[in-house]
Image (cartoon, rainbow, N blue to C red):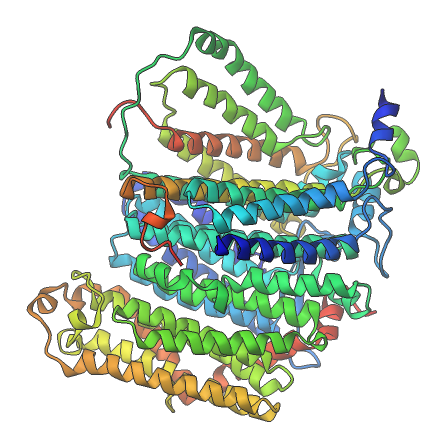
Amino acid sequence: MVSPILLIAIPLFMAFSVPIWGLISKKLPKLVPFFTFAITTAILVSLLPTLFSGQQGFNLTSVTIAGIKPPYGINLTFGPASAFFALIIQLVALAASLYLFEYEPPEPAEKFYMLFILVVLGATGMVLTGDIFNMFVFLEITSISSYALTAINKTGHSAEAGFKYLLLGSLGSTLFLLGIALLYGSLRTLNMAQLSLYIHQGHLDPKVLMAVVVLFIVGLGVEAELLPLNGWVPDAYEAAPIPVVSILSGVVAKAGLYALARVLYTIIGIETGVLNLLLIFGILTLLSGELSALRQKDIRRLLAYSSIGQMGLIILALGGGNSPMAMVGGLFQAFNHAIAKGLMFLALGIMAAGFNKWDMESLAGVGKAKPYTTFLFTIGLLSTLGLPLFSGFWSKFLIIFGLVHSGQVVYAALALIGSVIEVVYFARLLGYLYGKDPSEELLNSTLESKKGFALLGMTFLAAFVILIGVYPDFITNFILGGTAELVYKSFYISSILGGI
Amino acid sequence: MSEAIKTFFSPSVLGPEIFYGSSVALFLIGLYMVLVKKNLVKIAIGLTFIESGVNLFLISIGYVWGKTAPILNKTLMMGTPSKEVVDPVPQALVLTAIVIGVAVTAMALSIVIVIHDKYGTLNISKIKELKW
Amino acid sequence: MIRRLFVLVLLIIIGYFLGTAMASIPFGAEKVDVGPYRSVGNYYVDNTVQETGGVNAVTSIVVLYRGFDTLGEVTVLFLAATGLAAILALTRERRKLKKEKPSLIMRVGTDYLFPAAIVLGSYVFLHGHLTPGGGFPGGVIIASGFLMLFLAQWRYKVDELGLKIIESLAGMTYVTIGLIGLFKLGTFLGNFLGKGTPGALLSAGIIPVIYIVIGIKVGSEMTGLLQNLRETTENE
């Protein structure tokens, strides 16, 4: 019986079983993440056809756990928005797990693989769950495994980055829990559909509502890389192993983003004026990220700041939710950002493999030493810039036009300025990668031909970038359905609780 | 004896202020430690203070004056049990929250151990990256 | 100084903000149903005996109504043990401590208390569906027995491979119980065992089974955590 619950149960089983595989052969644990994600991706893809049927053109299934109907039991929701984010997570995880085949993880390797599976599991759970406390539990699974993976290199630098992340992250999730406690105290329920219904009917004291909004934005903003809470991002991206970084930007940040969107749109509801908060947070995050990226020499830090900027753009787009166009662009951008940044980080890992220097000077001319990898990196980069024929074009286009359409012309102009800054530093980066001659050391570093599986995973992601760039209809159904699911509360509520 | 305890915990002697107030106080003390203290271990302790504050709040929203623990016996099962016992849900939630808090504290301390091994100090102003 | 002042002002603002929000939730009031649905707490208390066969409402919630959270919680603890072992592995300098022997009282006391801790821990998790307690406290009591051993005998070490295998098998069993529910009843973690007489040791379906698994898992994980955090006397 295929059920969305398997997307959580199977990785959990596999993560617990890694030491048992390790007993049989030392080489087996390396393969476990890939097989796990291959199975879960297959399950997810086989479930997708069920999404697009019914009257509205899409539907939302609620999966009960322990046979107890919502709102009394925990339920999973499998609708277009959840499925869309789950798909993003699985694609990036699949590519990153292929990268692991030729990657020597920090010792002890078994623990690394377990943590790697668990971080993806936690993110998938956050995206699928229909219960707010359950979302907190999955948020903690995601973030605790990310702390461990950030610090796993065991250098002083990685420990510092890990501590910084842990401090902000655990503060954030405790605030999220406080928000849940306030909601439970007032409304005596934890089911998201029921909370949404009660808030919509005005059972919540406005003072509590305001506190909850602030606590949720601060709590989830750590994972979603919002401005005052993203101090951990550059350090963590610099200190963590490369496959982990691609997971942090492609999986953890997206799960945080989904949680933020779900909580603010579905539970709190956009009529309460949270959108203005999102617009302000979004634009500040966008501009600060892009401006900081200008000064970076280390490519990982540069990409980290660029990632912050992109997350700011997505939050900005979600803030333009009065116009569905901006919202659609935001979800599309979430997909593009996850795929393109995942691709860029993985490619960067190969570019610096056997060499381990990450600044622009040392990697100058890598386009001649490792042409195919650099080519893949460039695809990701151009998509991030939003060039036509790459998938990033459509999403940026939609966001900016959507913002103009909903009357936020100032924000649209600022977002355009952010994109121009992006062009400046990425052009400079490309100049270094292609324009110079490679150093001896770079030429002697590990050949790309030894990284076949990793290149396969990256080619897979790059193919998505191009495919969707040329033929965006491939995922538009998803995005339109996802936007509708997030915005129309009554659809969500009636799908889960039944008609009222 | 039990009468005395009941009077002590009745609303007239200890108002809701004591529970909500102490949870806010714990939260603020913890936040102060996280923001001001220089010692990594003290920061980690501050985090556990914040967690305790939230947990105390979570458990106190489930309380109902004068009601008993949500374990049913024959007498309770005769009537409507929900009128006789406190709300069990926050207790179940707080159990989860405590375990998660322990996990976070364990991770924090293990990272602190690595930092101490590498730098020989716990003072954040002597470690370059941790200043922000 | 200015920084502290700033922090204090910030704290006062946050405190006021939280205080006003909290004050609108009356403390100790009756838990009435807010809207068209029953409040989940009241629903659980009134239906736990019929639906789950367990008399302890908190355990019924922890294991069945919100069993998925508990699976997550077990995962978090597993994560903590795994992450700790991953971060502290190999690199950690094993410093030589002063070789001061544990006192006689500690050593002799442990000889008597260790078995008692194991028995008490097992009792607590076996009776989780009847009395306060359950898998988590039970597991922690067992781990505290090992903590005593660590304190009383400097050289004592638990076999790490064994711990690892117990942890894995217990976790896999938990997920498998959930999956059996999925295949037999069509719902993950479904209660596929009989409910029995409320209040009897063999009752409440899968609750005791899951609590036994949790007890074993928590016990081995906490022991592993303690062992990793302990500083040993010998260089390895």
Residue C64 appearing in the image: no
Give the quarter of the image for residue A371: bottom left
Residue C154 appearing in the image: yes
- Out of B13 and C230, give the one closest to the viewer: B13
Q: Is residue A190 above or below residue A439?
A: above
- Out of C104 and A4, give the one closest to the viewer: C104
- Out of A496 and B67, give the one closest to the viewer: B67
Q: Quadrant of the C terminus of chain B?
A: bottom left
Give the quarter of the image for residue A139: bottom right
Q: How many numbered circles does the render carry?
A: 0
Q: Position of residue A75 (x, y in %)?
A: 67, 57
Residue at image position (60%, 30%) is: C137
Residue furthest out toward the front: C1
Give the quarter of the image for residue B73: top right
Q: Is residue C39 above or below residue A279?
A: above
Q: Taking A462 as reference, is A124 left or right?
A: right
Residue furthest out toward the right: B79
Q: Position of residue A386 (x, y in %)?
A: 39, 86
Q: Position of residue A428 (x, y in %)?
A: 25, 82
Q: Is residue A435 above or below residue C189?
A: below
Residue at image position (51%, 34%) is: C217
Residue at image position (67%, 36%) is: C207
Q: Position of residue B99 (x, y in %)?
A: 57, 40
Q: Quadrant of the N terminus of chain B?
A: top right
Residue at image position (33%, 38%) is: A23
Residue furthest out toward the left: A440
Q: Taking C169 as reference, is A106 left or right?
A: left
